[in-house]
């Protein structure tokens, strides 16, 4: 989608520090990390938010979850744990209107979040 910063990362129009990539999913480091490990997992297809997922997106949504687990194992995060967050809408602080899942780890993550 034009004017979507994450779509421009998918198309490599904007350079990105890629951590993992397959046909459907791109994972890169957050530019403003909130934890020692802070990755963003996005579908390559433009989907605005969780509310815009359709039946046809079930596979990519599932793949993102599996990719979280795969990366957590690969990065040695299983023992201490990690958090996956998908902000949706204003109160949650969604700033980029291309659905993304934050994978946070490497410090104690308080609950409830601020
Ligand atoms: P949200 O608040 O929408 O859930 O999170 C958006 C995230 O995208 C933020 O954590 C922000 O730091 C990250 N972000 C915004 N612009 C860029 C960028 O140009 N590059 C990278 N790597 N991350 C970005
Ligand atoms: Zn997009």
Image (cartoon, rainbow, N blue to C red):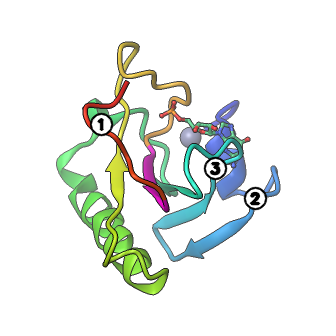
User: Which numbered disc flags the more N-terminal residue, 3 or 2?
Assistant: 2
Are the residues flagged by discs 3 and 2 in contact, CB closer than 8 Å? no
Query: How many angstroms separate mark 1 from mark 3 (CA)?
Result: 19 Å
Query: How many angstroms separate mark 2 from mark 1 (CA)?
Result: 23 Å
Are the residues flagged by discs 1 and 3 in contact, CB closer than 8 Å? no
Q: Dot 3 corresponds to which residue? A: 30
Could you say which is closer to the camera, residue 39 or residue 95? 39
In which quadrant of the rendered image does the C terminus lie? Answer: top left
Q: Residue furthest left?
A: 55
- Give SS at disc 1: helix
- Identify which residue is drawn at 40% across, 14% down: 90
In the rendered image, the vertical position of residue 87 relative to residue 26, given as above or below? above
Is ligand 1 within 8 Å of the beta carbon of the residue shown at mark 2? yes
- Is 102 covered by the magenta stretch? yes
Query: How many angstroms separate mark 3 from mark 2 (CA)?
Result: 10 Å
Is ligand 1 within 8 Å of the beta carbon of the residue shown at mark 1? no
User: Which numbered disc flags the more N-terminal residue, 1 or 3?
Assistant: 3
Residue 10 shows which numbered tag? none
Q: Residues within 10 Å of mark 3 (few under 14, many from 20)?
A: some
User: Which numbered disc flags the more N-terminal residue, 2 or 1?
Assistant: 2
- Identify which residue is drawn at 49% across, 80% down: 75
In the rendered image, the vertical position of residue 92 relative to residue 90, given as above or below? below
Q: Residues within 10 Å of mark 1 (few under 14, many from 20)?
A: some
Q: Dot 1 corresponds to which residue? A: 50
Q: Dot 2 corresponds to which residue? A: 16
In which quadrant of the rendered image does the N terminus lie? Answer: top right
- Identify which residue is drawn at 45% across, 49% down: 102
- Give SS at disc 2: loop
Residue 85, quarter of picture = top left
Is ligand 1 within 8 Å of the beta carbon of the residue shown at mark 3? yes
Residue 66, quarter of picture = bottom left
Residue 64, quarter of picture = bottom left
């Amino acid at each position: 989608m034009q004017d979507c910063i994450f779509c421009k990362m998918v198309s490599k129009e904007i350079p990105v520090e890629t951590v993992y990539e397959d046909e459907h999913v791109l994972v890169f480091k957050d530019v403003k990390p909130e934890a020692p490990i802070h990755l963003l997992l996005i579908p390559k297809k433009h989907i605005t938010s969780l509310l815009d997922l359709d039946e046809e997106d079930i596979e990519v949504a599932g793949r993102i979850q599996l990719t979280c687990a795969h990366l957590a194992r690969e990065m040695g995060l299983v023992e201490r744990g990690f958090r996956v967050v998908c902000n949706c809408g204003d109160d949650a602080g969604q700033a980029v209107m291309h659905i993304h899942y934050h994978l946070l780890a490497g410090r104690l993550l308080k609950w409830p979040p601020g």
